[in-house]
Image (cartoon, helix red, strand yellow):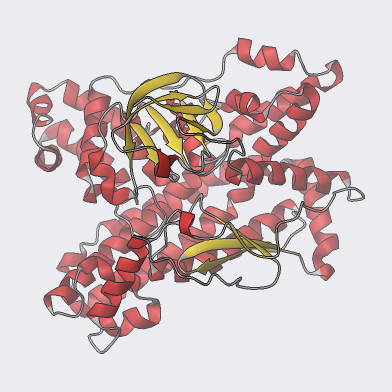
Amino acid sequence: MSTAPTAFDPPGPGTWLQDGVHVPRPWSRYQAEIHPPNLAAGFREGARRYGLLLDTLDYRMVHGLAYFAVAPPPEAEIPAIIAAGATAIQQRLWREDVERWEREAKPASIRDHLALQRIDPGGLDDAALAAHVERCREHQQAMIRQHHRFSVPAIMPIGDLLAHAAEWTGRPPGELIGLVRGTAPESAGSTPELTRLAGAIRASDGARSLLREDDETALAALLAAPGEVGAAARAYVDLVGYRLLDSIDTGDPYALEVPHVVVEGIRLAVEGGPPASSQASDAEVAAVRDDVPDGHRDAFDELLAEARRVSPLRDERGLYSEVWAGGLARRALLEAGRRLAQAGRVEEPVHLVDADWAELQPLLASSGGPPAGELAGRAADRASRTAADAPPFLGAPPEPPPPLDGLPPETQRVMRAVGVSIDALFAPSSRANDATTLRGIGASPGTYTGPARVIAGPHELHRLERGDVLVVPTTAASFNVALPLLGAIVTDSGGLLSHAAIVSRELGLPGVVGCREATRTIADGARVRVDGEAGEVTLLD
């Protein structure tokens, strides 16, 4: 039974919208403390670079749930912001940023992650472990800022395509977004490391037999295997093992804590892999292009090329930034929690994430901090609530954004493109549901019938079986390692640019997002039919 707080007061003046897409359940105190200021700092950098006429996204946590407001820019900075918008459009700055991501930011992040990953927290004395926790925390904050520094280039060209193509063709965004399909392989869980591992196992009868063992035994045996199989297994686990699963909260498990999804993904890859979506065909593109007026077809071609160029950045900026860093921080905190549990200072190792930094420091130094019962109570409270228990907004009722008339053309274009993308990320369906049919947004076409697996959070991912219809509040980029197991995806939250929508398209799975009530209406194990074109989920029994 929910113990949702009775008072949700706005954290400031104006309108505060709930972010249930990224925060479907309350976050740990550890995460809630570090995420908002670093998100705001990173987003502000991107907003300034692209000339967004706002200061940043002011992100606040209220009873562990996320609310955000758009902060206006300082009046003195408006001329410089408008000039930056013109530069961004004229120089196509996203091209430079995608190249910078590929050549600099992503490789440097991987090096930094692996350097921390090679340190075994269990081999450190207490003082060194406390220093390691702090180092992981500082690294995690830098990665949160990096993720959101790249947010605008990751979404603006896609919003630019949707805004212009919808105006030119009259086609709905759901049809248009499919033209970007097949351009983000990592969103479908496809990596060179997994391909290498699957090939090595297929070439070895002994390695294939290992996969018939239980999940933990199979994974340990693969990692210890001699030759190419072991080397490939270690390279793959180095890449995905410490990524958080279905979350960006350090309070939730990383992949190695749920070996079932890792090993099942390997088994599936060895057997040939899931059906993968290919890039939109020339015929699909031509059908849309034919609806574009003659004078705009060259512009349409360029907009599509730019949207495809940035598409991988949409998920990668999280996977290779805060998702991996969060898992490394969690590993260090769990080791500290294990020692504190042995000393009777916490009831469970994981309860350490329910302390903020001012409380963590004396706990790590064995010189104070909250009592074990208080931390356990915080963890229990978090587990008892979801975003559905909280108001969709706080403060003044939401109003339409102000008109863009009168602004310079480049500023209008940037603001419209980002506005379309944010709408497509957060806005669920408004179509009415009934007792047997849930109506959401058709994110990926196709029809699939199978058993529903209603998952409340990453701690339940071990229940996923191949062919299940995943029914969840939302998914995060960190969930990609588990998605190849699925037959279809259904979510409560999110729109056409939400993570679940993107991965359903990349995997070629039927997907319906933004159903609002799926996790409360569909019983676990019930047979459902998912129609990704109509955006409907039908309960069959």
Residue at figure coordinates x 86%, y 61% from the top left? 79
Question: Residue 80: x and y, percent?
Answer: 82, 61
Q: In the displayed structure, would residue 483 be above or below residue 106?
A: above
Q: Nearer the viewer, residue 406 or 97?
A: 406
Q: How many marks?
A: 0
Q: Say which of 50 and 433 sits in front.
A: 433
- Classify 540 as above or below 460: above
Q: Residue at x 74, y 54 (%)?
A: 52
Q: What x and y, as percent, mark residue 278?
A: 48, 19
For this orientation, the residue located farthest to the right is 406
In this orientation, does residue 54 appear?
yes
**Which residue lies at the image location 71% right of the left edge and 67% below the top edge?**
14
125 and 169: which is toward the camera: 169
Residue 107 visible from this viewpoint: no
Left or right of 95: which side holds 228? left
Quarter holding the C terminus? Answer: top left
- Classify residue 263 by image quadrant: top left
* Relative to 101, 256 lies left or right: left
Where's residue 405, x and y in %? 90, 48
Q: Would you say 231 lies left or right of 86 here? A: left
As drawn, which residue projects farthest toward the top? 283
Residue farthest along the bottom direction in this orientation: 367
Q: Picture coordinates of residue 229 (x, y %)?
A: 16, 32
424 w.r.t. 19: above or below: above
Image position of 392 (left or right of 261): right
Of residues 277 and 533, the one nearer the viewer is 533
State whether residue 165 is above or below residue 13. above
At 12% from the left edge and 37% from the top edge, which residue is drawn?
Answer: 218
Viewport quadrant of the N terminus: bottom left
